[in-house]
Image: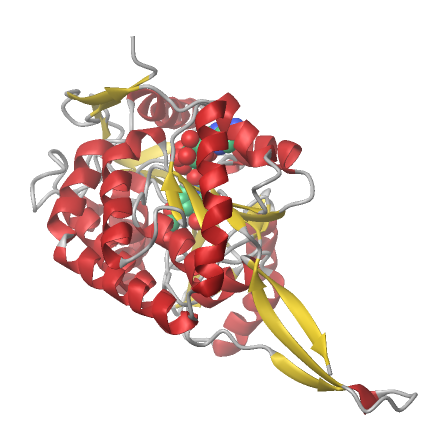
Amino acid sequence: MADFKIVNPYNGELIEEYNFANRQQVDAVLELLVKGREIQRATPAFERSNILLRLAQLLQDRKEDLARLITEETGKTISDSRVEIERAYNTALASAMEARAICGEALDSDAFPPQRDKIGVVLWKPLGTALCITPFNFPINIAVHKIGPAYAAGNTILFKPGPQNRRSAELLVELCYAAGMARSVLQMLIPDIDATSYAVAHPQVQAINFTGGTAAANAIAARAGYKKLLFELGGNDPLIVMPDGDLDAAVNAAINQRFATAGQRCTAAKRLFVHRDVFGAFAEKLVAATQKLKVGDPMDDETFVGPLIHSAAADEVEQRIHAAVAGGARVLFGNRREGNILWPTILADVADDADLVAEETFGPVMPLRSFASVEELVTLVNNSPFGLQAGVFTQNLALAKQLFNRLDVGLLAVNDGPGFRAEHFPFGGVKESGVGREGVRYAIREMSYQKALVI
Ligand SMILES: NC(=O)c1ccc[n+]([C@@H]2O[C@H](COP(=O)([O-])OP(=O)(O)OC[C@H]3O[C@@H](n4cnc5c(N)ncnc54)[C@H](O)[C@@H]3O)[C@@H](O)[C@H]2O)c1
Ligand SMILES: O=CCS(=O)(=O)O
């Protein structure tokens, strides 16, 4: 019996079954990737840039094939999957541009006595081999956010995709080879948890570039020892609506950033904070717009909300909705399930300690929480172990700057939701949302070290 079965989350069809790689296979690919470091050392930045540029073009050329694979393996709607490949194109393009722009600094020793008449030259150098581990929900763009910058920096890469994503990951790696990356510079493997943990601790791995949940991150951190860790983890991101905010724009952002990808996004608008003066008007507009969303077959161009990744994920979200309702929450819309599909659900009066709002809830459910003052709002938002991104709708710039300074997050978007992301912007959180920053230029630095020459 195979170790893993890839099953279509929408129709339950078996797509593929396979066995995980073992420790011996981890050893073999890492031995190859150590040799690949010489190829990287001999490849000038402009050549790495040209290869990444070719990858960007190949992603564009194979957009539909990649999108269909993503939808089949994750249940993400085909329109969301196409957007993901457009984003991956931008990520690869940004990696190509930044590969040419990696520059250090020159220092003069005479800044402090004694006089030495020395010049210091500080350059960025690759760490060696990066183990890049990716989650199920954005299997291509998140992978390109790791492979692109790690390659641009001159590293070799062991790519470990989510087990559900083997086919889309294999096509991505094929495109990387077609673009010019050597097989001794990029290798993909899907080991079992034991062999993945073995790879994490392996002496020939210098950096762990991980995106996923807290449990996995804790296991990796416990095994990694003295290695560079770049962790992009969970979020419980707030979308805030102030009395002077544009309600239509806020509704649009809430729907696109909570119900798209069936709510399975780290930066999804998982908690809605609406000032009490506009709570009723906002809720009415939100319900009216949500009623128009098409729910169902993710391969249908018109579908807005498809299934969750598997039945256990749907069970967890459904149970949290039911527990919140049992705790006094009101259902304004939704609370309906068919198979792995949960209807977009809007709740009010959810208890602040309900799992649905206290934990990261990875599904299409929106708890609305009213507030009366900025002090109350800041306390509510910061009362979370997560701190990824936030969004606020207001015309008051002074308030926006106050929230920027007081909210414990990695990014505050003004008149946009917490799901704002531009591939070249710094990306990452504080607290349990992660360590370090992605965003192409920032990830290149995370996958590098500074080396100084004194002359
Ligand atoms: N911050 C971000 O950029 C970002 C983006 C997407 C998803 N996420 C987070 O990821 C989670 C959902 O994705 P998921 O279900 O694929 O996450 P997950 O943590 O279950 O798995 C992520 C990856 O880690 C691997 N993995 C699992 N256990 C491991 C272990 N003990 N050691 C090493 N690797 C291990 C998995 O095989 C997969 O490849 C959510 O918490 C979401 O918030 C964060
Ligand atoms: O899950 C989050 C990934 S992204 O869409 O914010 O890049």
Which color scheme does this rendered protein use? secondary structure
Where is 380 relative to 414, above or below? Answer: above
State the residue in front, 234 or 348.
234
On the rendered structure, is 107 left or right of 48? right
Where is 341 relative to 267, above or below? Answer: above
Where is 347 relative to 434, above or below? Answer: above
Q: Measuring 23% from the left and 51% from the top, which residue is drawn there? A: 175
On the rendered structure, is 287 left or right of 135? left
Where is 340 relative to 399, above or below? Answer: above
Tell which quarter ligand 1 is in: top left
Q: Does any portion of residue 82 appear in the rendered image?
A: yes
Q: Measuring 87% from the left and 87% from the top, which residue is drawn there? A: 112
Res 7 → quadrant: top left
Figure disc tally: 0
Res 375 → quadrant: bottom right
Residue 73 on image: x %, y %: 22, 32
On the rendered structure, is 365 left or right of 54? right
> On the rendered image, what quadrant is the N terminus found in?
top left
Residue 405 on image: x %, y %: 61, 67
Direction right: furthest residue: 114
Q: Measuring 44% from the left and 47% from the top, which residue is drawn there? A: 157
Res 347 → quadrant: top left
Direction top: furthest residue: 1
> On the rendered image, what quadrant is the C terminus found in?
bottom right
Q: Measuring 14% from the left and 23% from the top, which residue is drawn there? A: 11
Residue 388 on image: x %, y %: 51, 52
Residue 259 on image: x %, y %: 27, 44
State the residue in front, 409 or 154.
154
State the residue in front, 404 or 367.
404
Q: Does any portion of residue 212 appear in the rendered image?
A: no
